[in-house]
């Protein structure tokens, strides 16, 4: 039968081929469920004599896509695999040397937004640079890495060469994906209610406190009157023996959610069939297969962590249940996509069950996509209205949502009142270093409010601190980290340290004579720069001042460079790197123990180097680093002395007290005999080769 592409994918495929012929790169950005992997399989099918290097986040994704393709095409795997070289991104990263052996004509980057990850991205860039003539086809439901500075991977990798782009809303409006019933609700509302009560108590505005307390009471009653999840699932799970995928955040979250199975789903089925799927589960493949094959008259629930977020479709899914503490826009759309599949006629159900007020509004992004797509569609007003009626949004917590909005408005108004006072302080004093107990003339506790903003910013307190609010505070000199931002005092102490010791190598626990914790200040400064970037933490003038005193930003890197210079000096002097274990340089660098800690994983007087980069290994190799373990080297020395004794005396009957060149050779031979008689005893390793070598020089084992 061969591959039969849907019309939207056939159009995308033809556009991708044309782009790869002219610009070598083509990205296809289609929602989950539209069958975009078939585009890459079609490329392999139509170019049987060319090598296709296919990269994906996991083998499971690729093999599931292949199984679906073979089922639809009515052919075996061999017909599609003959010219495909499949690799996961992690395998490519772990073994970059294989890149030189691949020699692809085409490179498929499945879920190409994942190439923005630091290590995976390096390996992919090297692959693309190694084969500049290869065609590159990228597939993803989104090109934006929302939680990574909004990076656009279609620009970074494909330089904007997009063969086809379609939103989830557009796919639903065009009828490519089925229109779902979308149910929103809230779980764990007790904790949500407590969080809002804490926010109201911390607001500090007495004028709005009474009104907020009244709204809180209305919210409490509304939450109590809202239907429980057991009734909501019973109400909207029209297919009581259906299959539903339940998305959880992590293993701890999954365990907690599975404890609710009887409580939540008891009205639908008292004995639902429950399955789990996550990467660390050894029974995952078996459970996943059983779920797919389960055609019983029971409710089927597949609890998942990560692995079904992207690239994998399960047939006959009746809906998804999003149990979302938090979620990125990418994951949100991918998880919805598990219930939507091209060519499917039934209307799936999406249960968006969240545990916080902010997450209730994720549906707005999908609704906006649908409206924008409808505006572009060449259809009548009646047709648009029919579609809107077909997309059923069942907001089970609408009264609660309205009360949440009222509280948010009031608390935001409180925020603005405090912000105006903060701006007045800034205008008067030129900074926002407000003492914690500072109270304004109108009675506002400005110091504690600013402290609370810092805690919200760091995720240590409940609250809503938008990017717009952060920018407004930054404009009036907000100090987010008091410890690292006390610049004048910290820098003055660092100057004094530099004058006394001639460097800026401050130990983490160092406290100056005046009692200032300079080590902690330096450590906090390094941490802030590493997390947010140096330009965010320090202005250009501050950066230059620190550079003049030799500020060390990468402590481990600085240690490596200092010790490597000592090793290079030893090599220039001695012609090798056979450094005695107790050797210390004139600069008091324990070079011997450092090299031993690298070779043998032993803790010494310097911090153990857990891992070395390829570049660091190469630097040591250039100096003749001997990577053999110490006991191997000692064995070779002692065996050489034993062989010389044998050549001189014709036997190995060495007196126990015999010593030569500082080696107690007699005791060594005696210990070897004892070791062979009692192999479990501690001491040297005695393998077959060593036994054979000793036999060759007349060893008497009795």
Image: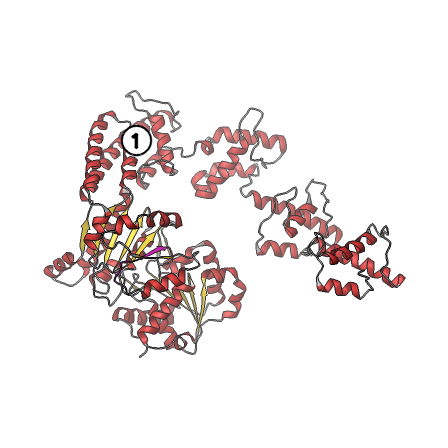
Which residue is tagged 1? 419
Quarter of the picture holding the C terminus: bottom right
Circle 1 packing at 10 Å, graded few (<14), some (14-19), many (20+), is: some
Total count of labels? 1
Of 180 and 373, the residue lying toward us: 180
Say whether residue 209 is visible: yes
Residue 648 coordinates in the image, percent (x, y): 89, 61
Instruction: Check residue 440 for magenta coloring.
Output: no
Residue 357 coordinates in the image, percent (x, y): 26, 42
Determine whether the residue tagged by mark 1 lies in a helix, strand or loop. helix
Residue range corresponding to the magenta coloring:
297-306
Instruction: Check residue 302 for magenta coloring.
Output: yes
Secondary structure, magenta segment, majority class: strand
Quarter occupied by residue 699: bottom right
Q: Where 216 falls versus 50 (above or below)? A: above
Left or right, residue 69 beside residue 407: right
Of 29 and 359, the residue lying toward us: 359
User: Furthest residue to the left?
Assistant: 382
């Amino acid at each position: 039968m061969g591959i039969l592409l849907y019309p939207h994918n056939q159009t995308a495929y033809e556009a991708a081929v044309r782009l790869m012929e002219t610009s070598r790169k083509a990205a296809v950005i289609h929602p989950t469920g539209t069958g975009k992997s078939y585009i890459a399989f079609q490329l392999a099918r139509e170019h049987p004599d060319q090598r296709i290097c296919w990269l994906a986040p996991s083998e499971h994704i690729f093999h599931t896509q292949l199984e679906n393709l073979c089922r639809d095409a009515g052919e075996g795997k061999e017909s599609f695999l003959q010219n495909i070289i499949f690799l996961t991104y992690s395998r490519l990263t772990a073994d970059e040397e294989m890149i030189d052996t691949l020699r692809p004509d085409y490179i498929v980057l499945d879920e190409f937004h994942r190439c923005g990850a630091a290590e995976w991205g390096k390996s992919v860039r090297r692959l693309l640079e190694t084969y500049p003539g290869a065609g590159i086809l990228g597939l993803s439901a989104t090109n934006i890495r929302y939680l990574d500075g909004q990076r656009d991977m279609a620009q970074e990798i494909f330089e904007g060469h997009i063969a086809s782009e379609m939103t989830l809303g557009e796919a639903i409006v065009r009828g490519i994906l089925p229109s779902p019933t979308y149910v929103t609700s809230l779980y764990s509302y007790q904790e949500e209610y407590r969080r809002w009560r804490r926010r109201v108590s911390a607001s500090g505005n007495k004028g709005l406190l009474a009104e907020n307390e009244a709204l809180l009471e209305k919210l409490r009653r509304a939450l109590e009157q809202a239907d429980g999840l057991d009734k909501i699932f019973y109400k909207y799970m029209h297919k009581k023996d259906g299959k539903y995928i339940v998305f959880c955040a992590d293993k701890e979250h999954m365990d907690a959610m599975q404890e609710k199975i009887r409580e939540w789903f008891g009205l639908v089925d008292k004995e639902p069939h429950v399955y789990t799927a996550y990467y660390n589960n050894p029974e995952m493949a078996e459970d996943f297969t059983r779920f797919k094959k389960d055609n019983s008259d029971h409710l089927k629930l597949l609890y998942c962590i990560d692995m079904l977020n992207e690239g994998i479709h399960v047939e006959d899914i009746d809906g998804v249940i999003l149990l979302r503490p938090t979620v990125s826009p990418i994951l949100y759309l991918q998880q919805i996509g598990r219930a939507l599949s091209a060519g499917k006629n039934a209307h799936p159900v999406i249960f968006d069950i969240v545990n916080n007020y902010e997450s209730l509004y994720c549906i707005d992004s999908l609704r906006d996509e649908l409206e924008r797509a409808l505006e572009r569609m060449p259809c009548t007003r009646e047709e648009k209205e029919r579609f809107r009626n077909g997309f059923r949004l069942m907001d089970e917590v609408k009264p609660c949502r309205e009360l949440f909005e009222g509280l948010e408005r009031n608390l935001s108004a409180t925020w603005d009142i405090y912000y105006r006072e903060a701006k007045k302080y800034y205008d008067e004093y030129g900074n926002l270093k407000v003492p914690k107990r500072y109270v304004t003339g109108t009675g506002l506790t400005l110091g504690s409010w600013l402290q609370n903003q810092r805690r919200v910013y760091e995720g240590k307190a409940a609250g809503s601190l938008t990017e717009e609010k952060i920018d407004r505070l930054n404009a009036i000199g907000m100090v987010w980290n008091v410890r690292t931002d006390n610049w004048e005092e910290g820098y003055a102490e660092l100057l004094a340290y530099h004058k006394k010791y001639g460097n800026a190598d401050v130990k983490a626990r160092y406290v100056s004579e005046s009692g200032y914790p300079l080590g902690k200040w330096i450590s906090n400064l390094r941490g802030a720069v590493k997390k947010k970037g140096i330009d965010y933490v320090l202005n250009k003038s501050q950066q230059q001042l620190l550079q003049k005193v030799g500020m060390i930003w990468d402590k481990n890197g600085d240690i490596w460079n200092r010790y490597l210079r000592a090793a290079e000096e030893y090599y220039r002097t001695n012609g090798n790197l056979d450094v005695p274990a107790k050797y210390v340089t004139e600069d008091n660098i324990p070079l011997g123990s450092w090299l031993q800690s690298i070779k043998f994983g032993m803790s010494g007087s310097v911090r153990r180097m857990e891992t070395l980069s390829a570049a660091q290994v190469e630097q040591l190799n250039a100096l003749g680093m001997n990577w053999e373990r110490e006991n191997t080297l000692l064995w070779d020395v002692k065996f050489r002395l034993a062989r010389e004794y044998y050549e001189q005396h014709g036997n190995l009957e060495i007196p126990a007290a015999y010593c030569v060149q500082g080696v107690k050779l007699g005791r060594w031979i005696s210990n070897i005999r004892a070791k062979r008689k009692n192999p479990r005893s501690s001491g040297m390793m005695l393998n077959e080769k060593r036994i054979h070598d000793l036999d060759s020089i007349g060893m008497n084992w009795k």
